[in-house]
């Protein structure tokens, strides 16, 4: 059967006026956006979050970002860009922390920023990570922890970003977000923020 007939077009006329579209599918990020922005961070072909790092997957109800091992600022820019793209597209985002033993302050501030945008929930939060949320007065984040979320779909490792300037800005914004949560945080991060502002210029 011809392509035009499959599309319900009259195949008796304009038989030479046919366009064929070839789509090459790969594992990883796959939101069909019809021309809108897509997550910048590429996903590698390595599936299953067995090692440390940031992993991405999609289910019918939401996109998933999973953190494994120790999440540090070196991975945070790719994590943030991907999360922002998901939220900009109007999708819900599940942050799966079931394999995450530690988040540094850049990740903590970034998680706060994302939760503040809405449509973000956290699952599998380990006691050590919950203690960090509590210590830094991250009440909004604590309020978005859930236990009743479907299991994550197949996940693929995200490649870390390689833009040093963007990474420095992400570190600064994350610390500013944490600093705004309490007077104690302001005091704790004052010198760090001042140094980062000078560095970013």
Image (tube, rainbow, N blue to C red):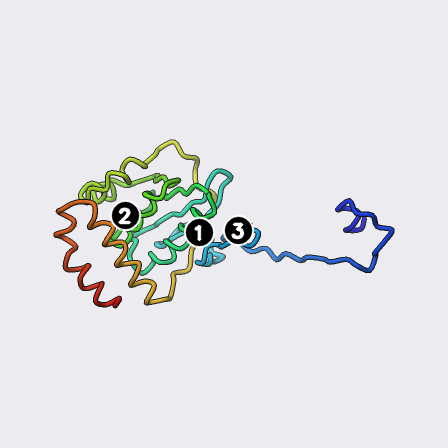
Which label sits on residue 85?
1
- Closer to viewer: mark 1 or mark 3: 1
Say which of 91 and 123 sits in front.
91
Q: Which of marks 2 and 3 is nearer the N terminus?
A: 3
Q: Residue at label 2?
A: 101
Q: Do the residues labelled 1 and 3 touch (CB within 8 Å)?
A: no
Residue 38: x %, y % from top left: 49, 54
Compare marks 1 and 3 and give the one earlier in the sequence: 3
Query: Residues at badges 2 and 1 in contact (C-beta under 8 Å)?
Result: no
Closer mark to the observer between disc 2 and disc 3: 3
Observer-side mark, 2 or 1, equals 1
Q: How many marks?
A: 3
Mark 2 Cα-neighbour bin, 10 Å: few <14, some 14–19, many ≥20? some
Residue 51, how many percent across, how many down?
37, 54
Q: Is mark 1 on a helix, strand or loop?
A: helix
Mark carried by residue 180: none
Circle 1 packing at 10 Å, graded few (<14), some (14-19), many (20+), is: some
Identity of the residue drawn at 61% across and 57% down: 24
Q: Is residue 42 left or right of residue 52?
A: right
Q: How crowded is mark 3: few (under 14 residues within 10 Å), some or many (20 or more)?
A: few
């Amino acid at each position: 059967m011809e392509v035009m007939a499959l599309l319900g077009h009259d195949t008796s006329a304009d038989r030479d006026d046919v366009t064929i579209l070839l789509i090459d599918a790969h594992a990883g990020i796959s939101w069909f956006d019809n021309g809108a922005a897509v997550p910048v961070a590429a996903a590698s072909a390595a599936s299953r979050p067995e090692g440390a790092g940031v992993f991405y997957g999609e289910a019918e109800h939401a996109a998933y970002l999973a953190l494994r091992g120790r999440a540090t600022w070196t991975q945070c820019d790719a994590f943030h860009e991907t999360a922002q793209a998901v939220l900009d597209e109007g999708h819900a985002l599940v942050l799966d922390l079931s394999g995450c033993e530690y988040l540094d302050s850049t990740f903590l501030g970034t998680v706060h920023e994302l939760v503040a945008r809405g449509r973000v929930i956290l699952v599998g939060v380990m006691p050590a990570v919950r203690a960090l949320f509590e210590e830094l007065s991250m009440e909004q984040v604590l309020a978005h922890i859930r236990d009743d979320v479907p299991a994550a779909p197949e996940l693929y490792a995200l490649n870390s970003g390689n833009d040093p300037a963007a990474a420095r800005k992400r570190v600064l914004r994350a610390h500013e977000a944490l600093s705004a949560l309490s007077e104690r945080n302001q005091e704790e991060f004052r010198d760090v923020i001042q140094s980062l502002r000078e560095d970013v210029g």
